[in-house]
Amino acid sequence: MAAGDWDWTIQDNNRDHSERVALLRPISYEITAPLNVSHEGLVLQGKALSLNISSGGMLVLMDREPLLDQVLKVYVPTPITQAETPTLAEVRWTRRMPFSKSTGNGAFFVGLKFIF
């Protein structure tokens, strides 16, 4: 593990984090390949683990690193266990887990902002 793997900036301002609620659940998501990719129109489906949620977005743990500003369709769990609400969300930041594989696939924290 490289020395800088744990050197993440930490903001001491909780203004944007006060309304977050822990939500540990598997969620489904879809990523549509960007138009400049040879697999135009390809939809990748996967599962992620939601860690917390607020009215503005959510933090998830994914097994792949999405592109910044990429739009995902996430299926947000609702209080009714049989229902999920499809919501568009934009990738705002990603961080590789320091103890995940350094090459190829690994685990990534991904900050998503809901698009209204």
Image (cartoon, rainbow, N blue to C red):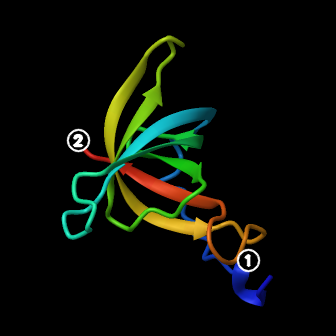
Under mark 2, the amino acid is Phe
**Taking the image as drawn, is residue 15 in sight?**
no
Q: Is residue 36 above or below residue 26?
A: below
Q: Position of residue 110 (x, y in %)?
A: 52, 58
Quarter placement of the N terminus: bottom right
Residue at point 72%, 71% (across, down): 101
Residue at point 58%, 68% (across, down): 95
Q: Position of residue 88 (x, y in %)?
A: 30, 42
Q: Is residue 33 above or below residue 96?
A: above
Q: Position of residue 72 (x, y in %)?
A: 35, 48
Q: Is residue 39 above or below residue 50?
A: below
Residue at point 46%, 66% (across, down): 93
Quarter placement of the C terminus: top left
Under mark 1, the amino acid is Trp
Identify the residue position indicated by label 2 in the image: 116
Q: Position of residue 17 (x, y in %)?
A: 52, 51
Which of the two discs, 1 and 2, labels the residue nearer the N terminus?
A: 1
Viewer-side residue, 3 vs 63: 63
In the image, taking residue 88 as reference, residue 52 lies left or right, namely right
Q: Secondary structure at mark 2?
A: loop
Identify the residue position indicated by label 1 in the image: 6
In the image, taking residue 108 as reference, residue 74 lies left or right, namely left
**Taking the image as drawn, is residue 68 in sight?**
yes
